[in-house]
Structures are given as C-alpha cells and as structure tokens.
Image (cartoon, rainbow, N blue to C red):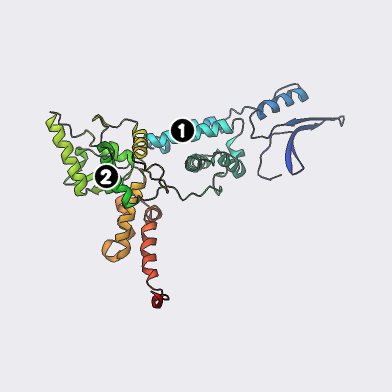
C-alpha cells in the first residue's frame, strides 16, 4: 500500500492477487468485527458507500463526511477566484482555469486539499492522457491552483509536481515553405490575412485577431499587450503586414467608416472575429488538403515559424544578430527558456548543417 494515500477513518486496504481491495473495518469492544467492502477511493460511489457502511456500523453518518471548514476545496477555489492571481488572467486563460477548478472539485469531492498526493494527480492525469495537450494544460492550471493554495495554508505540498507526463513531438511545429505557399496562394483572403499577421509578427492567434488595430500602431510599430502573459511588446511591422493594414484602411474609407479601433482581421463578411475562427480555420485546412499533413499544421505553428526564421539568422552570427535575445524580444517572453523553446529547431538545424561539413569525403572516389 503506497504510503502517500490518505484514507478515511476505518478504511483499510488489503492486497490480494496483485490487486488492492478496500474495506470499512471496525473491531468492537466485544472483539466482534464489522467489515464491509468499499470501491476504490477514487471511484464514483465511494463516498456514498463509505457513508452507508458508517451508518450500518455506528448508526450515524460520519461527522466529517462533507468538510465545510475554511480549508476545503470549495473555499480554496472561491478564494482563488477572488485573488488578483486569477483576476489578472486573460479571459481565455480564466476559462481554462475554471475548467481545471471544476475538474478538481468533481474528482476530489469529499477530500481535503491537504490529503491530495502526487499519486492522486498522476491517476487523474492518466485518465486524460489520451489527449496530451488537454491533459498538460489541465495539469498546468491545477498546479497553479495548488501552488497558490500551498502558500495560503490549504495544503502542505503541490501534488502536481513531478507528475509523469506524455511527451509529444507533434505540438507546434513550424510550417514548411511549400505549405505556407499553398495557403497564401490558394487560401481564402480572410484566413490568409490572419496567417500573414501571425507569421510576420510571431504573436498568438487571439492577439492578432483582436489587437491588430490602426489605433495600436504608431510609425509602423504595433504596440500589443499580450493576452496570455500581459507583456507589453512593441512589434515593428513587416511591409507585408503594413500593406494589409493600408488596404484595410482604404476599404474602411471607401465604405464611409473611419474607425481606428476596428480590428484589421475580420470574417469573410467583414465582421470582427468574436468567435468561430477555429472552425473556419479547420474547414479551410481541409479544403486545401492540409489537414492531414504530418507533423500537424496548427495556427500556433506560425509563431514557431516566426521564431525559427529569426533563429536561423541568429544562429549564423549571434554577435551580429543579437542571439537568443532577438527571439525573446520579438515573441514577448520574459524567460530565456521560453525563447529557446521556440528557437531550438533553428539553432539545431544550423548547427547540424555546419557539423556535417566536418565529416571527410569517404565516398568521393566512387562518385
């Protein structure tokens, strides 16, 4: 029996035939024994089975079955959502954090936060692992909640640390040149414009769709406050993006609508993207037969493409081109680790290209 499982009072495990079984077991003063099998503590129905066993044995429900003190999950999440740590998240990030909080409450109903151990979180992660991206995002958010809770006395550890995660190499790969060319030449204008903005600025989808506005551009520099991190990032705009903005303003003037706060990127009907971009994007990739390309082509991959192109130039001469700091500055990351994450492919490819030239021409005589 692992030592880090916190069991309810009177619950005892027994291992038989390589499997753990759980029992509600009480030895009375007259040496008679009350014993009743229980589901696994993580299974649905455990709480009600435990309650029924307690009533059958003692005639009353356990007093601490539904903890209502100030250190329970309900109070933890309530306080977390009132704190600036949560309130300062972007709207999209709050939505994802809410999903993580709901998952914590539904999974560990009846448990206290300080009873949760890495084994519990590993079991929860494994249930989600068929969708690695979702599993990793949920774990990141739950880890943030536990880290916040630990500093405020709700728990003594962050049980999400050192969880074994599914490693995937099919995340946000850079787009190959032929795929970009196909999208740009055959794609529908409202999708192509969004792709142009993403490739040439390196910014995230929602920031491109919602913040690329004439009012946020001064002397060819786009001043964007990144929705995910809140980092203010000045982005000098490429001539391709400036041409797209100029065309947008001409169309606005022709229509008699001068609004510098109107987003440059719009739907096929000329309306700002409120929702639905993901569906339109997926439909366009399918129409262009780009949806089955491996590694999978994603919109966020344009961000990696931007970093890879910059990284290739940086790798040629860190002294002249500014090294990793240039990638870090362009993408708006505060840490070297994240900048290196996006640029590592470019640096690796350039290094390998130079390394291969060090090998002798073993087969030269047979060519």
Place of residue 67 in the rendered image (x, y in percent of width and height, measured from the top left): 61, 29
Secondary-structure class at tag 2:
helix
Residue 185: which quarter of the image? top left
Residue most toward the bottom?
Answer: 365
The residue at the point 62 percent across, 43 percent down is 119
Place of residue 240 in the rendered image (x, y in percent of width and height, measured from the top left): 20, 47
> 318 above or below 106?
below
Residue 35: which quarter of the image? top right
Nearer the observer: mark 1 or 2; the answer is 2
The residue at the point 21 percent across, 45 percent down is 241
User: Who comes first in sequence, dot 1 or dot 2?
Assistant: 1
Kindly identify which residue carries mark 1: 98
Between 193 and 31, the residue placed more toward the observer is 193
Q: Which mark is residue 184?
A: 2
Secondary-structure class at tag 1:
helix
Place of residue 26 in the rendered image (x, y in percent of width and height, measured from the top left): 79, 32
Residue most toward the front?
Answer: 366
Quarter holding the C terminus is: bottom left
> 271 above or below 188?
above
Q: Residues within 10 Å of mark 1 (few under 14, many from 20)?
A: some
């Amino acid at each position: 029996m692992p030592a880090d499982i916190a069991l309810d009072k009177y619950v005892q495990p027994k291992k038989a035939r390589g499997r753990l079984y759980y029992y509600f077991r009480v030895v009375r003063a007259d040496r008679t024994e009350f014993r009743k099998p229980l589901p696994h503590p993580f299974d649905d129905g455990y709480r009600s089975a435990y309650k029924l066993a307690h009533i059958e044995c003692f005639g009353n429900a356990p007093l601490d079955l539904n903890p209502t003190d100030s250190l329970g999950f309900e109070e933890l999440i309530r306080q977390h959502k009132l704190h600036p740590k949560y309130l300062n998240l972007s709207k999209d990030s709050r939505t994802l954090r809410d999903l993580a909080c709901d998952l914590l409450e539904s999974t560990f109903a009846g448990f206290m936060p300080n009873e949760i151990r890495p084994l519990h979180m590993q079991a929860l992660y494994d249930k989600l692992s068929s969708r690695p991206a979702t599993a990793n995002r949920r774990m990141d958010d739950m880890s943030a909640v536990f880290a916040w809770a630990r500093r405020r006395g709700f728990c003594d550890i962050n049980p999400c640390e050192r969880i074994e995660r599914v490693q995937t190499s099919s995340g946000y790969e850079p787009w190959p040149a032929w795929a970009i060319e196909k999208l740009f030449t055959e794609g529908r204008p409202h999708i192509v414009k969004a792709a142009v903005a993403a490739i040439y600025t390196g910014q995230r989808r929602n920031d491109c769709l919602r913040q690329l506005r004439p009012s946020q551009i001064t002397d060819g520099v786009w001043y964007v406050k990144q929705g995910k991190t809140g980092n203010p990032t000045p982005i000098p705009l490429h001539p391709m993006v400036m041409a797209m903005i100029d065309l947008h303003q001409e169309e606005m003037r022709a229509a008699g609508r001068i609004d510098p706060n109107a987003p440059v990127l719009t739907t096929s009907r000329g309306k700002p993207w409120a929702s639905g971009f993901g569906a339109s994007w997926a439909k366009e990739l399918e129409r262009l037969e780009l949806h089955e390309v491996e590694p999978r082509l994603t919109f966020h991959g344009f961000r990696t493409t931007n970093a890879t192109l910059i990284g290739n130039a940086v790798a040629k001469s860190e002294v002249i081109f500014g090294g990793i700091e240039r990638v870090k500055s362009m993408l708006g990351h505060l840490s070297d680790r994240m900048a290196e994450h996006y640029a590592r492919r470019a640096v690796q490819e350039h290094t390998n290209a130079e390394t291969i030239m060090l090998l002798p021409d073993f087969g030269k005589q047979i060519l």
